Amino acid sequence: MDARLQQYEDKMKKTIDYLAADYATIRAGRANPHVLDKLRVDYYGVPTPIQQVGNINVPEARIIQIVPWDRSLIKAIERAILTSDLGLNPSNDGSTIRLVFPELTEERRKSLVKDVRKKGEEAKVAIRNIRRDGNDAFKKLTKQDVSEDEVKQLCDDLQKHTDKYIKDVDALIESKSKEIMTV
C-alpha cells in the first residue's frame, strides 16, 4: 500500500478502535467490567484507574464485584462510582464492593440506542473528514510532479477505505444496538 494512503487508513482505524472502546463502556443491562474503565479513584492523592487498585470480577450476569487491595480505598471507590454517570449504587460489606445492574427499562434502552447511533454518526463524520483531508493533500501533489492519474487513483483508493470503515461503523452500531435491545 502507498505510504501516502497508509497514514489516512491508520487514522480511520483509530476512529473505529475509539468507537469500539467507547461502546464497551455503555451499560447494556448486563454486568460488564469495562463500564468502570473511565473511573478514577483518589489513591494517595493520585487519580488511579479502579482496575489498578483492586480485583474486578463478574460473579453473576448482573453483578460486578470489586475487591480493593487496600481496604481504606472502599469509601474512595464508592465515591467515584456515585459521582460517575453510571447510575449505580454500590454496596459494601467492609471488604468487597458490589454493583448490581438493574434491568433496563424500555425507555432507557431506546435512549441508549440513540446515544449509540449518535456516537456512530460522529465516527462517520470523523472518517469523512479524514477522507477530505487526504483528498486535499493528494490534490496538492499535482504541483509536485505527480501525475493526475496517480492522484485520481489515490483518491479512489481512499474512497474505498472510507466506504469500508463506514460499513464497519454501521456494523458496530447494529451490534451494540442489538445488544442493548436484547432483554
Image (cartoon, rainbow, N blue to C red):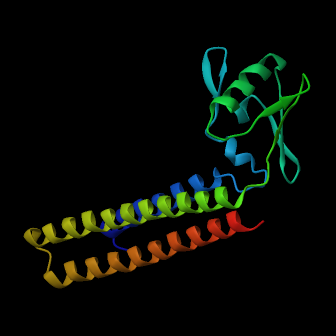
Image-based side of 135 in relation to 143, left or right: right
For the N terminus, which image quadrant? bottom left
Direction left: furthest residue: 143
Q: Residue at x 38, y 80 (%)?
A: 160
Indicate whether 74 appears above or below 130: above
Establish if 158 lies above or below 44: below
- The quarter in which the C terminus is drawn is bottom right
The x and y percentages for residue 106 are 69, 61
Which is nearer the eye, 37 or 100?
100
- Horizontal and vertical percent for residue 138? 20, 70
Instruction: Using the image as rendered, state which of residue 19 and residue 117 is in the foreground.
Output: 117
Which residue occupies the extreme bottom position in the image? 149
Q: Is residue 49 visible?
A: no
| Quadrant of res 20 | bottom right
Q: Give the vertical position of 179 relative to 53 (above or below).
A: below
- Relative placement, left or right, of 29 versus 62 is left
Residue positioned 74% across, 46% down in the render:
33
Whether residue 78 is visible here, answered yes or no, is yes
Query: Does residue 159 appear to the left or right of 115 in the view shown?
Result: left
